[in-house]
Image: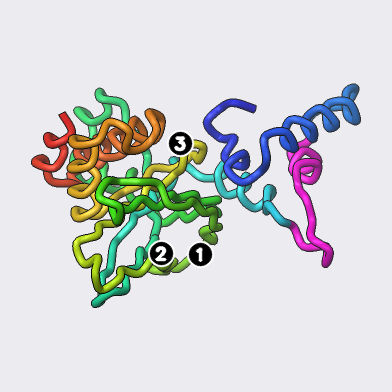
Amino acid sequence: MNDNHSISTTSIEENYFYKRIHEYLDLYKYNNVDGQQLYEMLESYDENGQPLYHVSEIMESFIKQKGIPIVMMERISNDHDQTITLSQEQFVSLDIELYKIYNNEQKDTMIKGNSTWVIPYSYSIYSNSTGKPEFLESHYITLEDNDDRKSKTTISLPTKDDEATNTKIFIKGNEDQKGYYLVQYDDESIQVACEWLKSDLNFMSYINRAGFISDIFNQLLEDRAEIPPLFLIV
């Protein structure tokens, strides 16, 4: 399952994933494919019988809706405390010819819908507290399907010491590009990442660098980002 909709691999261990796929194919080798049976085979449960991966909810939210989610990251700073708020919108990529056919009002209707998704969201934290940008830690959280599109999830960032007021932090969304969603960064995050990309060739893996640049390029095409920060990468 290497197509773009295999987002459940974001939180499922690769060995476990393929093991369960083989078991599913062996168990139902003479039957027609049943999506729900596949989801149940991939799922794992805690000691209370609660699902750990929410495979069914995730897949249903993706395959029954048009487009993909774009997760918007907004940094909020307060003295020494920093947080990132996450929210989501529907994104539908249009062919270049469709852009010529549809007027702006129709385009906005197609791209910005009311859909929300259950998203296994991954992110990595980088800091220059040692004098150069370095990876600190990575995390996975689940962004819930919520009818209230204004609903936001908040994540806390490492606090700054009094002696490290110049320390900068960058959050890379969609670690190793395993998730089927786009990420929109705030202007401050774009600025920090662009500065580090220029000064340190080892900042982020090549997959994360490519993913970040791709996300910024999408922001540029959709008028979601200013042009100058993008040129700092080149």
Residue at (30% x, 46% y) in the render = 133
Separation of marks 2 and 3 at Cα, in angstroms: 24 Å
Left or right, 51 with reference to 102: right
Give me the residue at 57% from left, 42% from top.
10
Query: Farthest residue toward the bottom?
Result: 79
Dot 1 corresponds to which residue? 146
| Label 1 to label 2: alpha-carbon separation | 7 Å
Q: Which residue is mark 2?
A: 149
Which of discs 2 and 3 lies nearer the camera? The answer is 3
| Mark pair 1, 3: CA separation | 24 Å
> To which quarter of the image does residue 232 belong?
top left
Indicate which disc, 1 or 3, sits on the residue closer to the N terminus: 1
Image coordinates of residue 79 in percent, x first then y, are 24, 77
Q: Is residue 49 magenta?
A: yes
Q: How is the image coloured?
A: rainbow
Q: Secondary structure at mark 3?
A: helix
The amino acid marked with disc number 3 is Gln
**Label 2 SS:** loop
What segment is highlighted magenta in the picture? 34-51
Query: Residue 3 in the image: x percent, y percent?
Result: 56, 27
| Picture residue at 37% right of the left edge, 39% below the top | 92
| Circles 1, 2 touching at the beta carbon (< 8 Å) | yes
Circles 2 and 3 in contact, beta carbons < 8 Å: no
Mark 2 Cα-neighbour bin, 10 Å: few <14, some 14–19, many ≥20: some
Q: Quadrant of residue 31?
A: top right
- Residue 177, labelled with which disc? 3
Q: Quadrant of the N terminus?
A: top right
